[in-house]
Amino acid sequence: MMRAWFVTMLLTSVLVPPVLAQGPPAAAVNVDAEGVALHGHDPVAYFTDDAAVPGAARFEHQWNGARWRFASAANRDSFAKAPEKYAPQFGGYCSWAVSRNYTADVDPKAFAVVNGKLYLNYSADVQTRWRVDRDGNITKAERNWPGLLAKGPKKAPGGR
């Protein structure tokens, strides 16, 4: 069992290496090519449904340089009244990556709501590692995030 864990950790450290490149300044929000945050998922539903629920273009709201989509008009209106309450931490970038001082995209289904805040991860596997020291990783990410915004993202290979 311990050997399998060690091999997994060794392989994942190779697959998600430390900072390799620096690009332009990080956007405040992780968006796709069309400027949509959270891969189109409803940020309010993470809190109300405890699930990653796809949003619809007809229930869209612009905030912080991104287009946010919602499953309903009620969710859109809740977000519009208090976006900071529902928006993901670290601009919707992977919380594990930010704790390691780089940015990475996310899988909207790899999420956690902790102390009333939404955190996302690159994948379920990365989320498992993030959870091992969740509070410590959040603290590291909070410390790193302002620098990533100021200096620009440092992305892992693969660009996702």
Image (cartoon, rainbow, N blue to C red):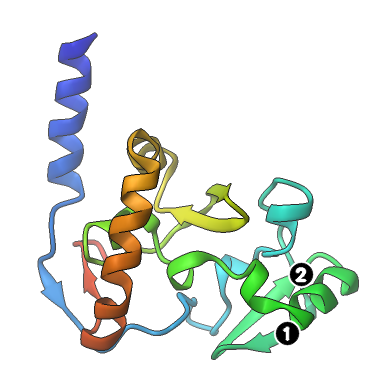
Which residue is depicted at the point 43% across and 69% down? 90
Q: Is residue 27 visible?
A: yes
Which residue is depicted at the point 56% across and 88% down? 64
Q: Of helix, strand and loop, which one carries label 2? A: strand
- What crowding class fits label 1: few (fewer than 14 Cα within 10 Å), some (14-19), or many (20 or more)? some
* Amino acid under disc 2: Phe
Percent x, y of residue 132: 34, 33
> To which residue does mark 2 refer?
70
Please report whichever mark, 1 or 2, sits nearer to the chain's N-terminal start: 1
Quarter of the image containing the C terminus? bottom left
In the rendered structure, are the residues bearing label 1 and label 2 in contact, judged by CB atoms less than 8 Å apart? yes
Rendered position, 51 above or below 86: above
Which residue is depicted at the point 54% across and 91% down? 65
Depth order, front residue of 147/102: 147
Rendered position, 9 above or below 136: above
Depth order, front residue of 116/126: 116
As measured in the structure, the alpha-carbon distance from the residue carrying label 1 to the one carrying label 2 is 8 Å
> To which residue does mark 1 refer?
61
Q: Residue furthest top?
A: 1
Q: Of helix, strand and loop, which one carries label 1? A: strand
Rendered position, 84 above or below 49: below
Depth order, front residue of 74/158: 74
